[in-house]
Image (tube, helix red, strand yellow):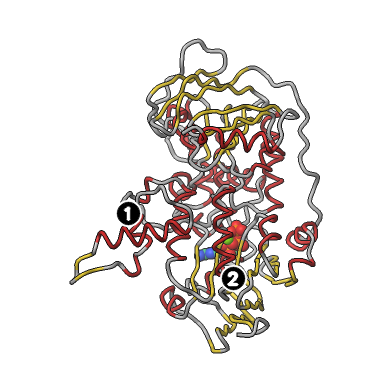
Amino acid sequence: MNSGTPLLAIHGLCKAYAGPVLDDVAFELRAGEVHALVGENGAGKSTLAKIAAGLVLPDAGTMMLRGKPYMPRNIRGAERQGVRMVMQELNLIGNLTVAESILLANLPHRWGWIDRRELRDRARCILERVGLTDIDPGCLVKSLGVGRQQLVEIAAVLAQPCDVLILDEPTAALTAPEIERLFAEIAKLKAAGTAILYISHRMEEIQRISNRISVLRDGRLIATRPAAELSLDEIVRLMVGRELGEAIHRDSATPGPVALRVEGLRRGDAVRDVSFKTRRGEILGFAGLMGSGRTETMRALFGADRADGGEIFLSDEKQPARIRSPRDAVRRGIALLTENRKEEGLLLPLPIRANITLLCLGQLSRAGGWIRATTELAAATRWGKLLSVRCHSYEQHVAELSGGNQQKVMIAKWLFRNCDVLIFDEPTRGIDVGAKFEIYRLLAELAAQGKAVIVVSSDLKELLALCDRIAVMSAGRIAATFRRGEWTQDQIMTAALSGYLDQ
Ligand SMILES: Nc1ncnc2c1ncn2[C@@H]1O[C@H](COP(=O)(O)OP(=O)(O)OP(=O)(O)O)[C@@H](O)[C@H]1O
Ligand SMILES: [Mg+2]
């Protein structure tokens, strides 16, 4: 096919839920191009992608695939015609094995029995494409961290041939080496003529791999340009329709007294003798590769997973705080915003209001135990507004929000609880550039109020912008800790790799 002819052409696409989400959108995807779709949280990117992949039906509009009318009624319909999508939210079934998830669509069988060996062998080959050589295809999906689940999901989609590949924030949970691997796969597919629709909030990635960029703002497609013609500032300006405020500026404020001290925390191979302390007024970052033990450390100290050993001390207490469960942790003023909002953080079928106030119904209930609905709504609205959660009402179910807005509800929920030690695991995953700065400012503000803030992030730039100190984890240990002004990106990367060199 001529590279100028669109493989997929979309015209006059409209979709409304409670309000309009897509408004008269025209969009073209060519064979052999990576076409990035950008826009703020809730702009309609995933909705557009889902329509093309057969998950959602539009209210109006037409689509043409290879010059023929195309309107898939479901995922199967789209897949049959060569259109596949990696979705923004993890969609694997936890109780299946990795191999089963990857080959779900066509499990190898012999006379009606699933051929287990064949299944494993094929899965192993496919996993290799995304660099997951160390995963046993027989292990359960739910035993993997979010980043790895995301890679399994990508592997599952790459396992099938397709002409149009839609990737909705595929790298949100990945760190640098996995991203490189994914980009290498994308380059191969592109060279083979696959048309790729790439949705991401990570601007550097977009500038690096895309040929063209389209910008959605409030459901309208406002520009499609060659990537080479758009500077970063221009993309952002088109996305948000205004100038972004100043980036946060952290000067080396004198931190307050110790808020949390962790001594010799251990859990299996993932967390090996981790000790650190964090002070009030400080933002402490945790950097490291995927699987380096950052999330596991936070979960163990929060009581979400049982630690094998180690003590946790709060403020200047001499006695260790006995934290056996998240409930104990919250009671002692520790909050953890988990990396997997769908599994652990949010109750999707409940309204935004209830999700935000969930952790402190006690505060809001009166003697009889009835929640004062108006107080609850007022509190939820206050925090929701602060984070600019985009919704038409706080009674709307969280399941209906865009990915980034779900993340904001999670943050609102923890802010509402007013804990002293706030741990954020990947706080800006899936959050658009504008809102990201709002969250940075908010974290800085929390620190200024005297809270101890811990941020785990795969995005090193984010940590460099935000933190007073950065602890770098490698193979389950803290390999190094750097102060603002004393670090370089190279030193941090070297520390992140150090634990794996002598193994
Ligand atoms: N099933 C649904 N019911 C009601 N509203 C919905 C539903 N799905 C999406 N919406 C609304 O449509 C709007 C666009 O959502 P969409 O998920 O397409 O945004 P997005 O651009 O992908 O955002 P993000 O960057 O946060 O992923 C949002 O305001 C969202 O609340
Ligand atoms: Mg989305």
The residue under the point 62% across, 35% down is 494
Residue nearest the viewer, comparing 333 with 262: 262
Dividing the picture into quarters, in which one does residue 36 lie? bottom right
Q: Secondary structure at mark 2?
A: helix
Q: Which residue is mark 1?
A: 97
Is 452 left, or right, of 331 in this rendering? Answer: right
Residue 50 located left or right of residue 39: left
Instruction: Tell whether 207 sits left or right of 76.
Output: right
The image shows residue 144 at horizontal and vertical percentages of 41, 46
Q: Is residue 392 among the parts visible in the rendering?
A: no
Real-space Cα separation, disc 2 to disc 1, in angstroms: 30 Å
Q: Between residues 122 and 196, which one lies in front from this camera angle?
A: 122
Q: Secondary structure at mark 1?
A: loop
Q: Residue sitting at 56 percent across and 49 percent down? A: 177
Residue type highlighted by circle 1:
Thr
Instruction: Return the residue at label 2.
Output: 190
Q: Nearer the viewer, residue 150 or 123?
A: 123
- Determine the residue positioned at 60% across, 30% down: 471
Q: Amino acid at mark 2?
A: Lys
Residue situated furthest top in the rendering: 318
Residue 39 image position (x, y, % from top left): 68, 62
**Residue 66 marker:** none
Local crowd at mark 1 within 10 Å, few (<14), some, or many (≥20)? some
* Image height of 445 relative to 407, above or below: above
Give the percent coordinates (x, y) of residue 282.
67, 27
